[in-house]
Amino acid sequence: MAAVGVTVVSPVSAMLSEMTGKQCKVLLVNGSPRTDGNTFCCLKEIESELQKHGVASEIVQIGRKPVRMCINCGGCRAEDASGCVFDDDACAVITQKMKEADALIVGTPVYYGQPNGGILSLMQRMFFSAGHLVQNKPAAALAVCRRGGATATLQTMNMMFEMMNMPVVTSQYWNIAYGAGKGEVRLDTEGMQTMRTLATNMAFLLQKIHADGQPAPQREERPQFMNFIR
């Protein structure tokens, strides 16, 4: 289910590992049912660049098996709950991997101007049932399309990150690459450079966060949720 990258440690990351006793790791999720399509090509480009900066990575595929949506059963909120009541699909696997990951990058193809339904179900369930695993961890999304709908897809993905206090990592442009046929995205040279810049920025932010050893900021407690209709 997963493809694990080989890491070449850069001088900066070697110093960071010596200072903190750990190596930063980014979890990359392929939200396409195609395990080796254009979305995977983008994630591999990011992974290769992360390796140059000494950041470990792992690409996980959601595959073609069904991913259950959140059914609002409240099971994950029960006093003795250990997470989502559904524990036998890609969401359960990726939730476990988030325990060890320091950052998250999610790639998705564009379907009707939206992210793939499977990746939406996965992220909504994971964030609701195990939001504590992603809090304060840098995140980024990328979208692959033939022609249009990518910016709307990115906006949908980023809105989830913002609600979870996840610093959104940027690039030199929106994280978009274009391609229709398998592997065609590699011909989008600007898109590939955008992916490499995203990886460089992710590595830079991770190194800054973990080098100073500062804890996450203390935030105000959330008030009672406000509704406009009383």
Image (spheres, rainbow, N blue to C red):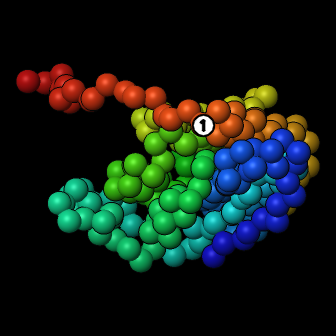
The quarter in which the C terminus is drawn is top left
Residue 189 vs residue 148: left or right? right
Q: Give the image location of residue 127, x and y in percent.
A: 41, 50
The residue carrying pointer 1 sits among few (fewer than 14), some (14 to 19) or many (20 or more) residues within 10 Å by Cα, namely few
Q: Give the residue drawn at x 64%, y 33%.
A: 212
The quarter of the picture where residue 182 lies is bottom right
Q: Give the residue drawn at x 69%, y 63%.
A: 58
Residue 81 vs residue 44: left or right? left
Q: Residue furthest left?
A: 230
Q: Give the image location of residue 20, x and y in percent.
A: 67, 47
The quarter in which the N terminus is drawn is bottom right
SS type, badge 1: loop
Q: Give the residue drawn at x 45%, y 52%.
A: 133
Amino acid found under the numbered disc labelled 1: Gly
Residue 142 drawn above or below residue 29: above
* Residue bearing the label numbered 1: 213
Residue 176 drawn above or below residue 3: above
Q: Give the image location of residue 17, x and y in percent.
A: 74, 50
Residue 163 vs residue 116: left or right? left
